[in-house]
Amino acid sequence: MSDKTCRENPMKGVPLDINFTTFIYSLSSSAMVTLGEAADPTTGKVEFHPQMAKHTIDVLGMLKEKFDNGLDEDERKLLCDIVYNLRMTYVNKNK
C-alpha cells in the first residue's frame, strides 16, 4: 500500500531510519530480550517475560500471515487512516 492509496504523506521529506528489514529485526530483538536470550538494553538484565515474548512473536506471525494473504479492504483502510492520523499528529507537534 502506497501513500498515494491513502492521503498525502505529511511527513514526506522527514528523514526516517526505518525500513521493513530494520522493523523486523527490531521486533526480533525485542522477542529475544523478552525470551531472556539477550540483555535488556535499558537495564542490562536478562529476564524471561513470557507474555511479552508471546505478544511479540504473535505480532511477527500476524505480519507474516498478512503478507502471505494480504489485507482485506477494512484492514487496509484502518491502517491507512491510523498512519495518516499519527503522521499528522507528529508533524503538528514538531512545528
Image: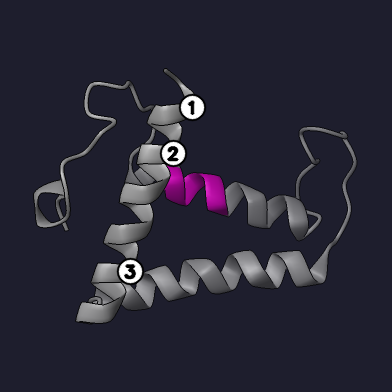
Determine crowd level at label 2: few under 14, some 14-19, many 20+ residues with C-alpha closer than 10 A. few
Above or below residue 66? Residue 29 is: above
Q: Residue at x 36, y 39 (%)?
A: 88
Say which of 1 and 4 sits in front: 4
Query: Residue 42, percent across and down?
Result: 80, 32
Question: Which residue lies under the disc numbered 3?
Answer: 78
Say if the magenta span includes residue 73. no
61 vs 16, left or right, is right
* Element assignment for label 1: helix
Left or right: where 69 falls relative to 51 = left
Q: Quadrant of the N terminus?
A: bottom left
Q: Is residue 69 above or below residue 9?
A: below
Nearer to us: label 2 or label 3 = 2
x, y percentage for residue 93?
49, 27
**x and y percent of residue 12 in the render?**
22, 28
> 23 or 46, which is in the foreground?
23
Number of residues whose C-alpha sits closer than 10 Å to that of mark 1, classed few (under 14), some (14–19) or many (20 or more) = few
The span from disc 1 to disc 3 (Cα, nearest Å) is: 23 Å
Bounds of the magenta span? 23-27
Q: Is residue 69 visible?
A: no
Say what amino acid the circle numbered 1 marks. Answer: Lys
Residue at horizontal 55 percent and vertical 52 percent from the top? 27
Q: In this figure, what is the number of numbered marks?
A: 3
